[in-house]
Amino acid sequence: MATATEPEPKLRGDSAVDPRDQSRGPAVRAMFAGIAGRYDLLNRIISGGRDQAWRRRAVKTAGLRGGESVLDICCGTGDLALMFAFAKPSPAAVIASDFTPQMVRLAADKAGRAGIAMPLCVADALKLPFADGSFDVVSVGFGVRNFQQLDAGLREMARVLKPGGRAVILECTPARGVIGRLAGWYINRVVPWVGNRLTRSKDRAYSYLADSIALFPDADALKARLEGAGFSNVHYRKLNLGTMAIHVGHKPEPIA
C-alpha cells in the first residue's frame, strides 16, 4: 500500500469490484460465488502448484500444541482448515467459516470426502458468530485482502482468541527490486488473463486479485496493523522469493 511519500499503485481497474470500496462486501461475496467451482484449479495454476505448500507452512508456523481449538476464517474450499484438522499434534476441534455459501458447500463436500467431521458456517469475518475468547488459533489464508475493513477484521480475530492465542495469516505481499517487478508483471498481466478466461468471471475476479495485492500493506505494514489491533510478539516470515508472507501475532495474556 502506498505511503504518504509513495504514489498510489497503478491499478488495472477493469474488475467489477473496486478493492478500495469500503462497502464492497456483498460484491466480493457475489464475485467469489461466481468462481467457486474453479477456485481450486486456479489456485494451483497461478501458484505453479505451490499454494498447498504455503498452507502447510502456515499450519507448521501456528505451533500447535495438541488439544487446541482452531478457527479458519475466509476458508474458501477448506484447504487450510483441513490441513489443520490433519495436523500433528492434533487439535481438539477445527471450525471453518466463509461468507460465501458456495465456498462453504464445497468445503463441506471436501471434508466429507476426507472423512473429517469439521463444523462449517457461513459468517462474515467482521462479525464472527463466536463468543469472546473461544479459540486458541485463528487462521486465514489469502483472505485478509478481502476484509471490507482490514483493521476491524484484525480486531475481530483478536476478540475470538483466548488470551495467549495466536493469529496466523498467510497472504500475498508486495516484493521489491527485480523480483517485485517480475512478480508485478505476472500478477497484473498473466494472472488476470488466465484466471478471468478459465473461470469466465463476469466480475473479472482475477483483475480484482491483482488490484487487491497492489493495494495491500507490505509485510512490515501488516505487522504494524496487527500490533494496532492489539496483538503482541508479532513476527512474519516471507516465502516464494518475498512474494508471500506468514504473519503470527499473539493475544496478550492479562497482567496479574
Image (cartoon, rainbow, N blue to C red):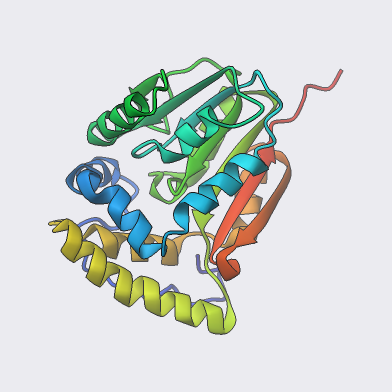
Q: Is residue 227 shown left or right of residue 183?
A: right
User: Along the line of sight, which residue is nearer the eye, 29 or 63?
Assistant: 63
Q: Picture quarter containing residue 205?
A: bottom left
Q: Is residue 185 shown left or right of residue 50?
A: left
Q: What residue do we see at 57% from left, 26% from top?
A: 159
User: Along the line of sight, which residue is nearer the eye, 203 or 111?
Assistant: 111
Residue 37 sits above or below residue 115 on the image: below
Q: What residue do we see at 24% from left, 68% from top?
A: 194
Provide residue 232's location: percent of width, then percent of height. 73, 39
Provide residue 49's location: percent of width, then percent of height. 42, 59
Q: Picture quarter containing residue 240?
A: bottom right
Q: Picture quarter containing residue 124?
A: top left
Provide residue 27's location: percent of width, then percent of height. 22, 46
Residue that extends furthest to the right in the rendered view of this protein: 256
Provide residue 161's location: percent of width, then percent of height. 61, 25
Q: Is residue 180 shown left or right of residue 201?
A: right
